[in-house]
Amino acid sequence: MEKDEKRLKEFKSLVDEANNNSSDRQKIAAHVDVVLFFSYDIVGSTKYKELHPDDWAGKIKKIFEAIKQRVNTEIKIAHIWRILGDEIIFVMKVSGKQMKFSEQAILSDSVAVIYKILQEATDEIEGGTKELSLKAAAWIGIVSDEEHYETDTKIPKKYKNLFYKYTVDETRNRKIFEFMGNDIDAGFRIKQFTYSRQLVLSFELAYLIKKFISHGECKNIELIHMGYKPLKGIWYDRPYPLIWYYDQSYKKVNFLQSLPYDAENENSIIKSYQSRYGNQSTDQNMTSNLFEKIAHDLGIDDKLTIIQQTLKNVEKSIEINDWLYNEDELHLHLAAVCCDFKNKRVFIAKRSTARGKYSACWEFGCAKANKSQGYIECIKKEYEDDFGLKIKIMVSSDRGEQCPTPYALYEIKENGEEFQSDKGIIVYAKIMNDNIDEFANKKDYKKHECSLLLTEEAASRFLSENKKSVPDFKDTIMHAFDIMKKDEEDYQWR
């Protein structure tokens, strides 16, 4: 027990080190990674909701928050993938080389911590109510990003899972990340074949940590073969081994003795297991020979070797938090007021009626800051893409970086929400197109209905007609004419 606790403390310290030193490591977009998935599922939640219609939501939320806090504390390199009903799923990239462990050790210690969290969180839940409990699952897969899934041929496609992002809101560039592949499917399939306080493992994950456990590094750990179940679409629907992870150090008794007296009446898998082994359980129930035979019969020996090699070779990888959540989009809006200095006119455009926010309102256009481009490059590209405008941005003359000169900051509350708002910066630009007049009454933009070029007199008439426009439109457009009262050479442009 002391040896196991020492290993878990060592694992936690190295996870902390990996997390704290992430900014010092070179971040590179690895073509493939071994990703560990694990989930916690609330047992008894359906009945609980029926019996406690007034307070179930707060209870479920509290449980998820507690699990999230434990994972954040124990495994900082793991992040939430999604919450599905009464289940919370986490993902983490694993690299034996990065974590200073062998590939089997990093997986074994990761699973040990996942199991530890399961037991501690369940103790906390059952201490408050006997109506709810937790069960868990863990699985792994080789994951390739969308760009290299097709082009990178080092690993056969049949062994790779795909990570990609898809857009759910074109106008706001909102995206959701997703994982797809046989290993992902298998993980979701095995989750149903577990029980309260139990952790079920995918075959590949169990195979890789079995050898490490067999060497006596974790004497309290058992991988228990609970039987077989065909999983739809997995292994050509051949029977899949159900492998439960058990750490005797928590209950101080063997696996069967740790189960509730009525477990076999509640769970057919346990009933079948007890009918085969009586009251005896042993860590030899899933022997190394059986692991090897299953891998050989299915022809996945090379897959398991590839997973181990990938674990061993991936030393540096883009941080999973960036990989999953941080889009190029920073949700910082950059509105450029585009000026025709020669004719003293300002460009405006009418938003499409199909756009959810400020539909059919007049505005100056807007770019969105991203991590892969500087402010100026970003604004120029988006205004050319949206309107066909070639522009130069007014920059600060006293700054070496030559950043855009901000006219104003703005913040627009989202649908009246007090704590949600679009935040942005207004800058000025000059139009460089030779054929500027074509934008005076141009139509059929992708995100806008039409555009106008207004002189100061025309702008005054336009504003007096109370046209629908974005907030602060009047002050901004009139200030643009003040800007153009000076010669464009009086400003610095980039």
Image: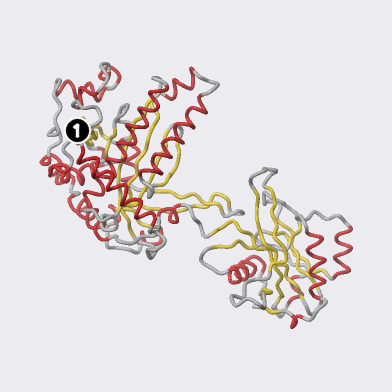
Could you tell whether 165 is left or right of 465 in the image? left
Vertical relation: 490 (above or below) 273: below
The residue sitting at 33% across, 58% down in the picture is 32
Expressed as whole percent of the image width and height from the top left, the position of residue 66 reads 43, 35
Q: Quadrant of the N terminus?
A: top left
User: Is 16 positioned to the left or the right of 214 in the image?
Assistant: right
Viewer-closest of 294 and 202: 202
Crowding near pointer 1: few (<14 within 10 Å), some, many (20+)?
many
- Left or right: residue 219 versus residue 321 is left
Question: Which residue is at a point 37% across and 32% down the rendered structure image?
Answer: 121
Helix, strand, or loop for circle 1? strand
Establish if 257 lies above or below 219.
Answer: above
Q: Quadrant of residue 402?
A: bottom right
The residue drawn where x is 35% and y is 55% is 18
The residue most toward the left is 289
- Say which of 417 and 338 sits in front: 417
Image coords of residue 361 (percent x, y)? 75, 55
Work out whether residue 120 can be spotted: yes
The residue shown at (23%, 24%) is 258
In x, y percent, where is residue 236?
25, 41
* Image height of 8 relative to 124, above or below: below
Report which quarter residue 260 is drawn in: top left
* 468 to the left or right of 387: right
Here the colouring is: secondary structure
Q: Is residue 391 visible?
A: no
The residue carrying mark 1 is: 224
Q: Percent from the top left, x then y, of residue 5? A: 25, 40
Q: Identity of the amino acid at label 1?
A: Ile
Image quarter hosting the C terminus? bottom right
